[in-house]
Each structure stands twice: as structure tokens, then as C-alpha cells.
Amino acid sequence: MRRATHTDSGLRVAAVYPGPDPLPGHFPFTRGIHPEMYRERLWTMRQYAGFGTARETNARYRYLLGHGQTGLSVAFDLPTQMGYDSDDPRAEGEVGRAGVAVDSLEDMRLLFDEIDLGTVSTSMTINATAAILLAMYIAVAEERGVPRRRLSGTVQNDILKEYVSRGTYIFPVGPSLRLTTDLIGFCTEHAPRFNPISISGYHMREAGATAPQELAFTLANGLEYVDRAVAAGLPVADFGGRLSFFFAAHDDFFEEIAKFRAARRLWATEMRARYRAPDPACRLRFHTQTGGSTLTAQQPLNNIVRVTVQALSAVLGGTQSLHTDGFDEALALPSEEAAHTALRTQQILAYESGAARTADPLGGSHFVEALTDRVEAEARRQIGEIMARGGASRAVNYMRSEIQRAAYERQKQVEASDRIVVGVNRFEDTEPQGRLAVEVDYSGLGRQQSDAVRQLRRGRSPPAVAESLEALSRASRREENLMPAILDAVRSLATVGEISGVLRKTWGRYAPDETDARPPSTTRADR
């Protein structure tokens, strides 16, 4: 492994270079959560993919795995995220558009056809219906003889950021947080290798948050989830080490690196101070995705450069897994060529750039250290504002308004050319660059998926479905973990819409303030 220990000229590189801060792998983990970082193991290369039907998405997964991808990341369509079946009138025009349509256990079987769930790590970007989709994943695995304890991956399950910035919520805040906590408790006991939540700043950053806001609002949400889990009787030492985070990587290279370093330090110190958490529960592990909102439809090949710079900041900042956007995602779902180029970008960073040879290579830089301190200080100030309002669940409107204000300020800077966006407000081309997006027949996808749902209903056992849904209804009115009842329902072939409908009947729907209401995004840039 000479490439991992020497420069291209043969000069030896140490695994880590000492500095004034504790070494990587040691509290408060500013320099990384592992002593030798990527020398021990490279980050997981996890390309986000999902479109149309489960069968079509399965073909893309097998293509990516065959070209060296090391983990799967599932994008679900908007009806699946909102708890509606594909044949529901409210799903019309959205089936398969922003991700894959999954209505039932049968779709989950097709989605992972010929993929070994005992060896692959799977991340699922799903929130309000996270418990239902994870139950389907577990059921498929067990049908194939893979026990729950062998499954690895992450389910997003971060409902608070939906109220703040994204909009794919269903139930009121209290019941939603109960469902989130139930899933954390279930995974802690039954699926200990599966991360039961990915606390996401990505969506808030994509909506316009600054880097310190992204950090502050994400960690404040994380503290709310820890509070809820502790109140439910879960020891921090048991579940704290399985919490994961999800951040964006945007264009300001050094600020992004500082943000990632500050995130680890801030989370570790808060976990230690608030909960007396042991070291394993203080380690902030995170996935990074390059900034979808930074991609431009103008001169789309420029996006390859943007994505590379952003991805390098995530690597130098110590990410545990990484998604690189396709250069054409500002136009449509990424083409196979764009997905291939995005994956090769990660592989070049891993094997050719030298960025993985030593832990925290920018540690000790006067600029990076000072910027890390400043990002952390501003994030702490913002967390204080949230706590003064009673915590994250009571500060949704505050966080939303702060993000909207920051987004407005940024847009004004772009329109005034105070912030340069190459190809948009400077260095524009008169001739179009690259191919036009391929038009997808979403109406055809909707009909195909709706037919499949109706066929499923005709072929299943109505009494078994009714019995499982009634059991779920009873459980939702009592204080018990809902995951066993949801598992029984998905095994009976109850659909996402039917299971969600039972919980809607018990809990009702979330009704945001009219002045703050924003429709859910259907673009892949807002994940």
C-alpha cells in the first residue's frame, strides 16, 4: 500500500501530524473520529439514486455497484415520502418523479432484487414514513435469511428538519417525534448496526441556511432527539454511538472544512456536558452530499468542477460517507454518464489526490483553526437562541425564518453580482453547453405503478390486512413501540398509504402557520 503511505515522489507521509489539539480519535474529535482516518478505511462512496419504478432503480443500483460504489442511497418519490399510494389522486403527476415509488413490500423486494442485504450498506432518505420503509427493508432481508442484526445502513428519520425547511411531514410534531423515538429504540435493540436516524442539515443548507446555521440547527435538532430518547428510557451509551448526521458541502472550500471540524467538537462537548456520554456516544459521524442548489443549468459541465471542490472539502473535513452530484442534475434526474462521472470523481480523490494519506491534513493551519473556532462560536450562539425558545421542537418557526432571511440575502447578492456564479452572472456563454435533459414520461410511470398497486390489492388476503391495520391502530393509541405492529402490517402487504392512513386517523395532520407554509419540493436538489 505504498500509495497510502508515500507521496507520488516517494516521500513518506505520517498517518497523523501532532498539533496543539488532541489527536484524531480522541475527544473532542475535532481532527477526526478515527486515529488514522482514511488509512484505516476509506469513506463509503454512496451515490444517491432512485427514479420511476423499483425495477428501474434496481438496474441503476446494480450498475453503480458494478462500477465500484460501496454503498446504496435510496431516493423515494414524493407520494412515498408523504404516505400516499401511487393510485391516490393526490399522487397524480408525482409518481416516480423525485425518486422511486415504493407502495408495498412487493416494491421493496423488486428494489433490492439480486442485491445481498447482508453485505451492502443502504441509506434511505425517508422521514415521515421512515418506520414503514425500514420495516419493509427488514422484512425483505428476513425473507432472504438475513437477520436484523446483520443489516447495516441508515434511515434518515429526521422529522424536525421537515417542519423547518423541506415540507414532507404528515403528523403533528409530538406524534412524529414519538415515531422517530420508537424507531431509535427498535434499532438499538434489534438492528444495532443500522443507524436509526440521520440528523440532516443538508436540507436546511439547500433552503438557504449559512454554514453556521446549518451546523446549529442540525445539532439542536439532534439534542432534541437525544432528549426524547432519554425520556423514553433509552441509555445514551446504548444509542448515542448510532446517531448519524448529514451535511451539505457547498462552494466556500475552507469554511466547509471548518464547519465539519467544528461540528465534531461541538457535538462531543454538548453530549459530554448534557448527558455525561462516554466517548463512543460523543463521536459525530456524518454523511456529506455536494450542494444540489449550487448546480447551474447554465454551462452544466462547470458543475463537475464545483462538485469536485465540494467533495474535496468533505474529505479533508473527515466525512464518513459521500455522495457526489451529477453534473446534469440542475436539468433533470442524473443521466447514467453523469452518475458515472460523479462516482469516478470520488475514486480519483480517494486513490490519486493524496487527500486520504493523513488524518486532518489541514489541522494546524492558522486560517482553518481560526475559522473552525469562529464557525463553532456562531453555531453555539444560534443554539442558545433555540434553547431559549424551549428547544428545537418549539423553535421551528424561528429556524425557518432565519433560513428564509439568509436565503433572501444570498439571492440579493447574486442578483447584484456581489456574489459571482460562473456562467450565471459572470462569464456567460451565448451558445448552449452540453445536452438537453431527456424528457421522462411520468404519466406513464404513474399508470404503471398504479396498476401494480391495484393488482397487489386483488391478490392479498383482505382479512389479514384488516387485522394488522386494526392492531396498528390500537397500538398507536397506547404507549408502546409501534415498530412490531408496522412490521406485521407490511408483511400482510398493507401499503404505505394504508398504514399512514391509520396513523393519520389517530393523530391527525400537522398544520403549519399560514405565513410559514411552504409546499414540499419535488426537486432532487432539495433532499
Image (tube, rainbow, N blue to C red):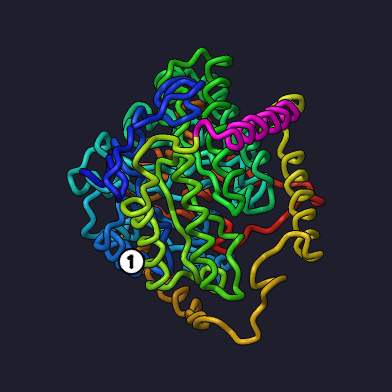
Compared with residue 22, is residue 505 higher up or lower down, i.e. above or below? Answer: below
The answer to whether residue 464 shows anywhere in this view is: no
Q: Residue at x 56, y 25 (%)?
A: 228
The picture quadrant where one finds residue 506 is top right
Q: Position of residue 224 (x, y in %)?
A: 60, 28
Q: Examine the rendered structure and indicate whether residue 239 appears above or below residue 196.
A: above
Nearer to the camera, 31 or 368: 368
Residue under pointer 1 = 60
The answer to whether residue 166 is left or right of residue 115 is right
**Which quadrant is home to the C terminus?**
bottom right
Closer to the camera, 515 or 165? Answer: 165
Q: Which span of residues is magenta-colored? A: 363-386
Q: Residues within 10 Å of mark 1 (few under 14, many from 20)?
A: some
* Kind of residue indicated by mark 1: Arg
Q: Position of residue 311 (x, y in %)?
A: 47, 52
Residue at (47% x, 49% y) in the render:
499
In this view of the protein, which residue sits in the foreground, 159 or 447? 159
